[in-house]
Amino acid sequence: MAYVAIADRNVHLHDPQTFVTKYIWSQDHKVIAIQYAITAIAIGLVALGLSVLMRMQLGFPDTFRFISPENYYQFITMHGMIMVIYLLTALFLGGFGNFLIPLMCGARDMVFPYMNMLSFWVYLLAVLVLVASFFVPGGPTGAGWTLYPPQAISYGTAGASWGITLMLVSLAIFIVAFTMGGLNYVTTVLQARCRGMTLMRMPLSVWGIFMATILGLLAFPALLVSAVMMTLDLQVGTSFFMPAIVSMGEQSAHAGGSPLLFQHLFWFFGHPEVYIVALPAFGIVSDLISTHARRHIFGYRMMVWAILAIGALSFVVWAHHMYVSGMNPYFGFFFATTTLIIAVPTAIKVYNWVLTLWRGHIHLTVPMLFAIGFVFTFINGGLTGLFLGNVTVDVPLSDTYFVVAHFHMVMGVSPILVVFGAIYHWYPKVTGRMLNDTMGKIHFWCTFLGTYAIYLPMHYLGIQGVPRRYYALGDTYFLPDSVHTANEWISTAAFFVAAVQLLFLFNLIWSYRNGKHAGGNPWRATTLEWQTPDTPPKHGNWGPELPVVYRWAYEYGVPGLKEDFVPQNQPPVGGESAEFHGHSHGYGPGHGHGHEHAPGHEPRHGSGDEHGRR
Amino acid sequence: MNLTVAFAGIAAGALVWWLAVRRLTTRPWEAQGTSDGRDSAGTTGPAPARIGLWIFLAVITSLFALFITGYWMRMGHGMAHGIVHDWHPVAEPRVLWLNTALLVLGSISMQWARGAANRGAADRARLAWLLGGVFAVAFLLGQLFAWRQLQAAGYYAAANPANASFYLLTGVHAVHLIGGLFVWGRTALRMLRGAELEDLRLSVELCTVYWHYLLLVWLILFGLLLLT
């Protein structure tokens, strides 16, 4: 028999009853989303703590004796890897993907709920293995987040045996978890959308998450291949990546391996990874801007096409991370060209965000502040990307703080601002309570201005030639005193920004009990997740009948209506062009419910095997 | 990376084509209403598990394409950099031919099982299904035998990148087949417990597709190993 998602089977909705089935071994996408989010934020806090330790050393060298050079390298490595993979990837796809895809598509759950549950638990295992590396002999790996061989597994690098092994194993486990989740996200978007939810009616959040998942499914295998090969080099003594090395006067057992092969494999994953993080952020921010500016998204189709174009192009730009690794110059030319080309669809998106705001009815709510902060920061980081995409400019700037500043702006701060905006936006749906507005605004301004205080001076450091990954600069003759002053300033700002995040955490916890009741649709938004009969949505999301969608996701500010928005599941009324006229069961805009279905059409739920046998 | 880029290009092209077919050019703001839900895939189209399998096959294709790319690049590395060429091809054990035949038989059996399941011939389906799994297990044992032969002949993994690559490629393929055997085993148990053929049809079909796919991958890997 064809597979039918548990929540869509022709049986009574199996509401989980016990604490264990409801919150631990849960197959409900919303609970899994929260599990993912909490785990990702928890491990992200570890990475935040590591960055504070790094900045203590960089801002005030020779002050903190307990930070050895080995420790410093371990901090930067774990900070980078955790932030990119275990926080951002997991939070955007495992967290927001899980929560939003079924709700925004009008489904009851993911199509493979059991696999979805496994995905989280395997992810948790990956995180635990990673954390375990802090407690093994030699500590975690200090190879830098790119884990380049030969130094990653050579004597002298911190964590070159236990630490790196656990890192590679953890990454492999993560990829298994991601694949299980990813299959769910893609298949759910393709197969479980409710009636009327055509692809071109999907909110851009879903588009961004959908495309990012496809990128992840095709790109993560490259990381798996490199992890497997490096593990063999380390544990079995093969020479895939390891060249012959004379270490401590002795010839190593390896010979003839190609470190460049690792770099190609790593960046074949690594560059799409940038967009695995960026595309969900692009999608989510489009929805935030449209909702809070009460205006339809400008150029919806172009936004969708840009997401697809960015996804495709992201596979042919990887070697721009390797301009100084030694490449045929024609390769450099090719990759510089593709890198500049990918700026075109990205710029289209930026224009469209700005044009959505233009003449919009902008509400400076906390999510909107974060969304505008994102656009601002993404432009900054994107422009320095154009610098670094050009070989001739990149070569002198390579491995300086200019690069650190660039990628933190473009894929550190920018996506995190979206994460914050998204949490302020959807927290009311997740918990039924609003986050505290005052704390939110303080959090935004301190984070936004604070990150500029950190990263703008880093561009200056880079142009001065300050190399990245140095434990201490010492008395380097070509560096002016201003570099040291800037480093102190950056560190101080970093401590401040890190401390402000505690306010955010406090807000999350405090508002859970004390926040204002949100109601079903506090932002008066059009998309389906705001139209659920219950808030927070119950198991199965939609009550007895699935919603039916009649329009796209951006019907804001329509002239002549009492409300300034029309939910996607509101049937057309007189005067509107319609291919089909359904009727509503006593439902009007703004009331945050509604799950009517069209007469003459069987509702999806209850018809049992509609998912199968075709 | 050429092979992988080509695969990624084809995958992206297929996706864009598919999406274009799905009327990516419609103007969603112009028409309200829903005619018959044709575009909401939940009401039409193949079962999610079928879509899931094909996406999974795309993921594995990416994985094997990258492994093959790595193999190719590592093989050319010595020559390209003018250093001593350290690639000494493995003398493939002859048992690999037998193993290939076993895998082909496995695929044929699974196809037979699928056909029988579609016709409702439960006994035949059960027999063919069990044969499909037995052939796969025999293939794995044969691969293990090939490994031991190579070890006995002194082809250690650490001794040469060609040896290491042989173990790696065959090992990764075997791991995927073992994964398939778990699913096969679950379906076999349900069959033996007398589950309705109707309920098993999708599992049988998807497992068969997976078997064919792994046969194809093996043929490519085997050809690559023989030719290099």
Image (cartoon, coloured by chain):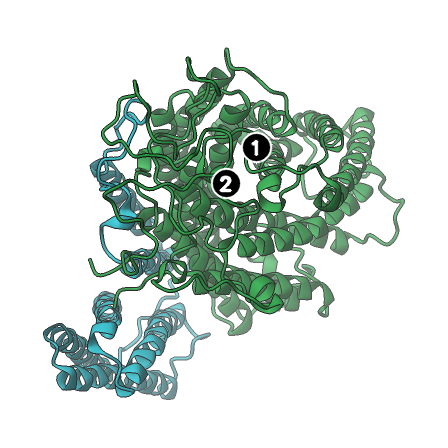
Chain colours: A green, B cyan
- Which kind of residue does numbered mark 2 sit on? Val
Query: Which image quarter: residue A334?
Result: top left
Q: Is residue A319 left or right of residue A417?
A: left
User: How many numbered circles are shown?
Assistant: 2
Query: Which image quarter: residue A166?
Result: bottom right
Furthest-front residue in view?
A586
Subunit of label 1: A
Q: CA distance from mark 1 to mark 2?
A: 9 Å
Query: Which image quarter: residue A467?
Result: top right
**Which label number is shown at residue A274?**
2
To which residue does mark 1 refer?
A: A410
Furthest-left residue in view?
B119
Q: Is residue A441 left or right of residue A294?
A: right
Residue in the image at 72% along x and 70% along y: A137
Q: Earlier in the sequence, mark 1 or mark 2?
A: 2
- Which kind of residue does numbered mark 1 sit on? Val
Residue in the image at 34% along x and 55% along y: B62
Q: Are marks 1 and 2 in contact (CB under 8 Å)?
A: yes
Look at the picture and state if A522 lies above or below B72: above
Residue in the image at 50% along x and 40% along y: A274
Label 1: element kind: helix
Q: Is residue A525 left or right of residue A558?
A: right
Q: Nearer the viewer, residue A16 or A282?
A: A16
Look at the picture and state if B183 lies above or below A133: below
